[in-house]
Every structure is written in C-alpha cells, then in structure tokens.
Image (tube, rainbow, N blue to C red):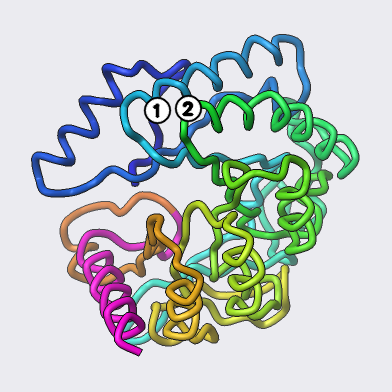
Amino acid sequence: MLANGGALPWEESQLKAQVERFQSYGLTLGNLMIQGFNNAIYARPGRDETIEKVIASIQAAGKAGLPVVEYNWYAHRATEGYFEETGRAGAGLTGFDYEREVESNGSKIKFKDLPPLPNEGAHTLDEMWANITYFLKRVIPASEKAGVRMALHPNDPPAPISRGSQQIMGSVEGWKKLVEIVKSPCNGITFDCGVTREMGHDPVEVCRYFASRDVINHMHFRNVKVVKPYERYSEVFIDEGENNMFAVMRELIRNKYTHMIYPEHPRALDYDRERGRIGGYPGGGGYASFAFQVGYARAMMQAALTV
C-alpha cells in the first residue's frame, strides 16, 4: 500500500502507471489511501464538489484495476499523545498516553485537555455521524458501480475525546454502526487488530464479526500491550504483544478473507537508525523492521493455511 494516491481527483492514467510499476516488480497494488476531503468530513461549503472529486477518483481507481480505496474520518487525530518508549535490546516502541503532558502555548497541559484547533473545531458524535452518512449515501453506490471497495480506518489512537471532538470510529460499536449505514461489501472497514486491542477487545472475536459479514476490505496486522483501554498502551514488536497473531490470521483464513494484509507500524531498530532519520511515529522504524514484520506475517499466513 502506498501512503496515498495523490491530490483529488485521481486520474486513471496516473493510477495505471502505479499499478504497472508494481506489476513490473512482480507485485500487485491492492489499496491506496484517499484524502483531501475535509469539506465533507466537517460539512463545510464545497462539500458536494469535494464528494464529486472523491467519486471521480473511485471511478478512476476502478478503471485502473485498483480493488480497494482506504480513507480516514477523524474529527481530530490524537497524535499529540504519542511518545517513544524503549523496548527489547533498546529498540524503539510507540507509546500513547491520554494523560500525557504536552506543550501548548508555552505551558504544559494534559493531552486530554488540549483545546480544539481553529481549522478543525469541536464536533459531536451526532454531527460526525450525520456527515459520514451523507458521504456514504453518495459514494458507496458509485463505488459499487466502479467495482471498488471502500475501507474506513478506525481511530488510532482511539482517544475518548480528541481536542474537544468525539470520534465515530473510536469504538467497535462505531465500526458496527458504520457498516449498517449503507449495507454493501463496498462499505467496509480496515480491520486493525492493534487498535482492536487498544480498545480492550479480543481481535479474534471482532474479526469474526466483520469478516463473516464480508466488510473487512483491508487489514492491519500488528501487536500492542495495553495498560488502560483507549488511554494508555504501547505499540510493540509483532511477536510480543497481547494479541494472538496466529489466531487472528486463522480467523481471516476461516472467513476466506482475500484482500491485503499490511503488517504496519514497524519498530525502530539500530540498523535503520544508522541509515538516517526515520519519519513517522515516535519509536517507529524503517526497512529492516518492516522486513521482520512481513516475514512474521507471511509465516503466520502459511501456517494458518495448513491447519
């Protein structure tokens, strides 16, 4: 998966070029992240024009042979609560703490008490549900015609309140509500077993619920250790957290899941750090750690297929 598919609206020729580039390396491009539609998220002037650009992008994706388009619907993403922790052999882990003190206007304040940002504002669940309902009822019929599945990523971090806003994808109940708004395999989620555990849920049970309904359209395969659900946890190596990753993979296989599995959020290793700055989350890693994640995930898949 690439970070995103570029500015809206996407062009068929540009997407085809990306698909063909992957094919030249013997790979398949199975998902791209779409973004740049804040007018729709916040129901601002220009919402309808923005949604038309999203629809045009989905149509281009279908013509280019891209099967899944992923997106986010944050009122605010709580990244201020992230910080780096030290894991085994000195590797970097990513911690999250809802109570963490951060800098704000020259003083210290707990993340949970940070005020809304001017470009975002504060929003209630009712507002955000109304906004995404409007969006889905326009976009999902178009995605069905294009043969493209949509995958909404859950809130990560799943903070209860993020800069004054409630989050529709900040609970498993929210995920369930989402897929009922427009009942279609095209209206699905990115199932993230790490976020599921961050919320205090068993990812095997949650996987079974959504996979049995054929609404897992993308999968994030990672592990965490939780101190307090929603509020305090650590993103750790894929082989050391609270999730039974083999059981998660077996549940995907049982339900005949056929879309991408992305072993995301690699940990920071010395090998990667020695090669320069690593972008992304505090404590996050690079190529070497991704190789470990991918190898582990493929081993889980191969083992699950033989059981």
x, y (%) of residue 268?
33, 68
Which residue is denoted by mark 2 in the rendering?
A: 146
Queried whether the magenta region covers residue 291, the answer comes back as: yes
Residue 214, placed above or below residue 17: below
Q: Give the CA separation, mark 1 to mark 2.
A: 8 Å
Using residue 81 as the reference point, say whether residue 277 is left or right of it. left
Which one is earlier in the sequence, the residue at label 1 or at label 2? 1
Q: Quadrant of residue 87?
A: bottom left
Which residue in the rendered view is the most extreme toward the bottom? Answer: 307
Residue visible at 15% across and 41% down?
23
Q: In the depicted view, which residue is nearer to us: 195 or 147?
A: 147
Amino acid type for the residue under numbered disc 1: Ala
Amino acid type for the residue under numbered disc 2: Ala
Using residue 196 as the reference point, say whether residue 9 is left or right of it. left
Q: Quadrant of the C terminus?
A: bottom left
Which residue range is magenta in the image? 281-307
Q: In the depicted view, which residue is nearer to us: 299 or 97?
A: 299
Which residue is denoted by mark 1 in the rendering?
A: 61
Mark 1 crowdedness (10 Å alpha carbons): few <14, some 14-19, many ≥20:
many
Residue visible at 69% across and 64% down?
100
Tell me the element at label 2: helix
Residue visible at 23% across and 34% down?
19
Residue 240, placed above or below residue 214: below
